[in-house]
Image: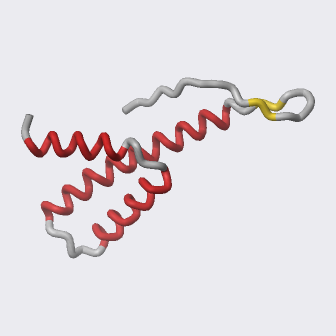
Amino acid sequence: MPALRRMVLRVEAKETKLSFETALGKLESIVESMESGDVPLAELLAKFEEGNNLLKVCEARLKDAELKIEQLKKLKDGKVAFEKFETTRED
């Protein structure tokens, strides 16, 4: 496996452990640096790939939150109950 591909896989694995807030903050930082116009093409491509991975992390975290919210149910006495659920992601 080429060294670049191994590096990308390590970065992707690390990014999947990030919280939504951390991933979003990093994504915003990448977008700002890309919009500055001062980034060389090779670095721009790397930032684009990293940003794309961070976007996937954010989408997965939001999907998980949406699933949790959908599983909230009001009981007759007005209490809220949480149910266990399995997440299924389309990566």
Q: Residue at x 49, y 55 (%)?
A: 21
Check the picture and name the quadrant holding the N terminus: top left
Q: Quadrant of the C terminus?
A: top left
Q: Position of residue 52 (x, y in %)?
A: 32, 49
Q: Is residue 65 left or right of residue 89?
A: right
Please name the residue shown 20% across and 70% down the image: 39
- Write down the quadrant of residue 29 in the picture: bottom left
The residue at the point 26 percent across, 46 percent down is 11
Q: Position of residue 50 (x, y in %)?
A: 28, 52
The location of residue 63, given as percent across then percent down, is 53, 38
62 up-or-down from 72: above or below: below
Q: Which residue sits furthest left?
A: 2
Residue 33 picture location, percent across and down: 30, 70
Taking the image as shown, residue 54 lies to the left or right of residue 4, namely right
Q: How is the image coloured?
A: secondary structure
Residue 77 is left or right of residue 43, and the answer is right
Q: Residue at position x 85%, y 34% from top? A: 79
Which is nearer the eye, 62 or 4?
A: 4
Vertical placement of 89 versus 33: above or below?
above
Figure disc tally: 0
Q: Is residue 56 left or right of residue 11?
A: right
Q: Quadrant of residue 42?
A: bottom left
